[in-house]
Amino acid sequence: MNASSLTRAILDHLAANRHLLIDAFLPPHPRSRLARTLLGLDRHHYSSVRVAKHTISTLLCRLRKQGLVASTGTKRKTIWTITGKGRKHLERAPSQKLVITDYDLPPEDHIVRLISFDVPERQRRKRDWLRKTLLACDYTLLHKSVFTGKRPLPEEILQEIEEFNLTPYVHIMGLDKKGTLVSQ
């Protein structure tokens, strides 16, 4: 589990349950196994309980510096709570995963389309979604951010691009002639 998804899981947990004790995720707490599984902190991801505890603790300290969570209590019994800024962050943050659905692909019309995009790094999840979606629509990767295909994109995808505010970054062109450089 990467840091952003762990952050999301912790903030979701705090929003739903009002508080968090790090020890609740680690043995010998009776519900620790379930909690670790839900957050992806089971032994398959971390070499030891100590490493998992350190990971959660470090992340919570970073979230506190950002003003997303607050802590009370002693060092060994720290209780973490979500702040108003943390709740706003959860509301603004996109969902955990952008879902790629099965689209009804229009038939090929053999007009070559070139799709080029330059989505900023801070919107990496949306950029990855766009790449996967174009591949699912039988477009071919020409370069990391350039795809070609011989069918129009479904209207649903164009609407999703607009909903995700990606229209300034995506350019779709139809090509009437295909060509390459040929050395003789």
Image (spheres, rainbow, N blue to C red):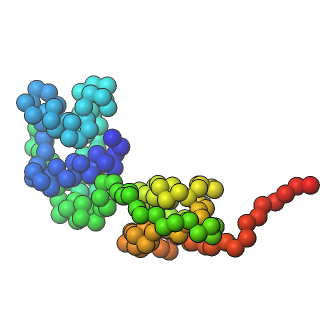
Task: Kindly indicate the quadrant of the structure image that contains residue 46.
Answer: top left
Coordinates of residue 47 in the picture (x, y in percent): 31, 25
Q: Nearer the viewer, residue 94 or 179?
A: 179
Visible residue check, residue 81: no
Coordinates of residue 45 in the picture (x, y in percent): 32, 32
Q: Quadrant of the C terminus?
A: bottom right
Q: Residue furthest left?
A: 30
Q: Which residue is painted at 35% across and 43% down in the image? A: 2
Q: Which residue is painted at 50% across and 74% down in the image? A: 168
Q: Is residue 174 above or below residue 26?
A: below
Q: Is residue 78 above or below residue 109?
A: above
Q: Is residue 118 above or below residue 60?
A: below
Q: Which residue is painted at 31% across and 48% down in the image? A: 5
Visible residue check, residue 108: yes
183 horizontally vs 31: left or right: right
65 horizontally vs 81: left or right: right
